[in-house]
Image: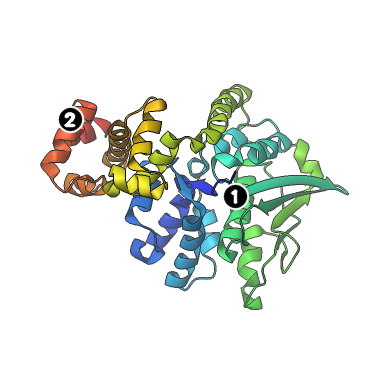
Amino acid sequence: MSRRAPTFAARVLRPLLRVAARLGVAREALDLDPAIVHAVVASPDTRLPARHAIGAWESLARASGRRDVALLAAGDVTVDDLGVPGFIATRAETLADALGLHCHYFALLVSFLRFELTVERRVATLRCAYTLDRPPSHFAAEANVAVSARFLRDYGPPTMALRDVTFVHSLPDPGERALFEAFFGAPVRFGAAQDALSFDARWLSAGMRLRDAAVSRFLRGLADERLDALPSQSTLKARVREVVLRDPRAASAAHVAAQLAVSTRSLHRVLASEGVQFQDLVDGVRAEIARGLLRRSDQTIASIALVVGFSDTSAFHRAFRRWEGTSPSAYRRNAG
């Protein structure tokens, strides 16, 4: 059986898009298909192929001419960008609990990166372990460690400090080290054995700032359900959904079947055995994207219609009324 392709939740790209906008970098310069950008905005838990995350960091650095794009994005990250795993970790009782939960549930955000916590000689180390065929880009590696440091700074014990930070890749310009040490508040070494951060192990028993046992238990139940559902991505229904989410404009049965390397006949037959019809699945995805864009963006209804695969705005109006029982404009007013 072949290994499943590495994926990540679309919400992971939110800080990157915000930084691009702040630096005046057009979204087109990020080499992201418009359907990917819309998934980030309208359906943040959509699973996307790993190459989009890795390539977007490199494109942002190139287009902006900035070496510190990962640090800028980490400085802009919110707990909502981390989804359920982030909320769970912030509500944990102690830092040890928070990092344990972070490591356990991180697959809900990224399937090709694991965080591992080790303690040796009274020093705790949180390291990144990748399952990609090749190392991540320098900027992606920096973002992974920087976001972790930002999490510790904002939600960990109030007076906690890092001991040091390490990266596997080298730093092209040694003069840029000051940027990193200012962000992390600790010595930063490049050309090391691992992408990691370390701190005194005594902090592991300290309490988290937003600890809440009841909320933590509730969120862990929700996360367990989502984690259990991840393997179901191998069902044809889930794979079709991923293809349509990536580009709802090209959602014909022939196109989707070709993307999944199955015949159109097999596509319909297997979906029927899973209890769903192809067109119902496509309509559900299009409705999901449309609802998200109507709630969270200022795009015109005509533009949203094009995004979800309708060249005729009146046809989109009819379809949306069939899906939601109301018009797109009324839905937007009520959602606001």
Report x, y in % for residue 147.
58, 52
Amino acid type at image mark 2: Arg
Q: CA distance from mark 2 to mark 1?
A: 39 Å
Q: Viewed as shown, does residue 178 lie left or right of 246?
A: right
Examine the rendered structure and indicate whether residue 213 appears above or below residue 23.
above
Report x, y in % for residue 316.
17, 39
Query: Which residue sits at x=37%, y=43%?
Result: 263
Where does label 1 land, which residue?
112
Amino acid type at image mark 1: Phe
Which quadrant of the rendered structure holds the C terminus?
Answer: top left
Examine the rendered structure and indicate whether residue 84 appears above or below residue 128.
above
Identify which residue, 121 or 266, lies in the foreground: 266
For residue 141, which numbered disc appears in the image? none
The local crowd at label 1, few if under 14, some if 14 to 19, many if 20 or more residues have their Cα within 10 Å, is: some
Identify which residue, 168 or 202, lies in the foreground: 168
Q: Residue furthest right?
A: 121
* Secondary structure found at label 2: helix
In this view of the protein, can residue 41 be seen by the observer?
A: no
Where does label 2 land, which residue?
321
Q: Viewed as shown, does residue 227 lie left or right of 255?
A: right
* Secondary structure found at label 1: loop
On the image, which quarter does residue 223 sit in?
Answer: top right
Report x, y in % for residue 326.
18, 28
